Image (cartoon, grey):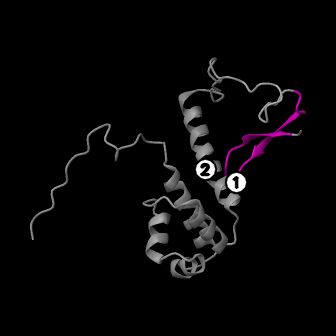
């Protein structure tokens, strides 16, 4: 056989991403694998329960495949989790990465972006009109295990 020659990756290549910015599929895989290992379950058993092939579940756990919401829900259920539990854990980890990056960069608070000025608001009486709809409540600290606090708004009509 011949010798394998590795080509250097050019900056800006789609395979090269800035350090500290994990991809969603990588974090989803870490969360699923972590939960499976914590439960001391083998990949083939969880895959069979979820109705996916062990190879596909392995690729999801390694961050090589991005599962559909249906597959993600099936795997989560096979692990005894709800889809919202998995999403909360992923969001918590991504938020922690963001917070660490902000602390490292010396910023105290994440920058909030306002909606562009040219965005139209719904007319009064439109189903999406929220004027006079009630009071909004803010809950802080909603995150998965080990995650950072996120802000969630609940609008009570």
Residue tagged 1: 144
**In magenta segment, residue 140:** yes
For label 1, the crowd category at 10 Å Cα-Cα, with few meaning under 14, some 14 to 19 and many 20 or more, is some
Q: Residue at x 32, y 37 (%)?
A: 12
Q: Secondary structure at mark 1?
A: loop
Residue found 80% across the figure and 30% down from its top: 129
Residue 35 screen position, x and y as percent: 62, 68
User: Compared to 47, does 19 lie above or below?
Assistant: above
Instruction: Identify residue for label 2.
Output: 93
- Image quadrant in which you'd find residue 157: top right
Q: Residue furthest top?
A: 117
Asked if residue 119 is among those painted magenta in the image, a careful observer would answer no
Report x, y in % for residue 78. 64, 74
Image quarter in which the N terminus is found: bottom left
Q: Nearer the viewer, residue 134 or 114?
A: 134
Dividing the picture into quadrants, the one containing residue 123 is: top right
Callouts 2 and 1 close, C-beta under 8 Å: yes
Across and down, in percent, residue 79 comes to 65, 72
Taking the image as shown, residue 136 lies to the left or right of residue 4, namely right
Of 11 and 114, nearer the camera is 114
156, above or below 86, in the image: above
Query: On the image, which quarter does residue 135 sit in?
Result: top right
The structure residue drawn at horizontal position 89% and vertical position 28%, both measured from the top left corner, is 132
**How far apart, in angstroms, are the residues tagged by discs 2 and 1?**
8 Å
Most foreground residue, 109 or 139: 139
- Image-based side of 81 in relation to 1, left or right: right
Q: Is residue 140 above or below residue 48?
A: above
Neighbour class for label 2 at 10 Å: few (<14), some, many (≥20)?
Answer: many
Q: Which residues are magenta?
A: 132-155
Could you say whether the residue bearing mark 2 is in a helix, strand or loop?
A: helix
């Amino acid at each position: 056989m011949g010798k394998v020659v590795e080509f250097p990756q050019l900056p800006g290549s789609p395979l090269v991403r800035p350090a500290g910015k994990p991809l969603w599929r990588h974090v989803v895989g870490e969360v699923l694998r972590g939960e499976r290992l914590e439960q001391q379950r083998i990949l083939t058993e969880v895959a069979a329960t979820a109705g996916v092939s062990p190879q596909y579940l392995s690729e999801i756990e390694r961050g090589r495949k991005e599962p559909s919401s249906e597959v993600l829900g099936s795997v989560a259920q096979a692990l005894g989790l709800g889809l919202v539990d998995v999403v909360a854990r992923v969001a918590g980890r991504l938020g922690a990465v963001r917070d660490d990056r902000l602390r490292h960069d010396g910023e105290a608070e994440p920058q909030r972006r306002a909606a562009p000025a040219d965005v139209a608001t719904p007319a009064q009486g439109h189903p999406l009109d929220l004027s006079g709809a009630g009071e909004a409540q803010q809950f802080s600290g909603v995150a998965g295990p080990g995650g950072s606090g996120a802000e969630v708004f609940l609008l009570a009509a």
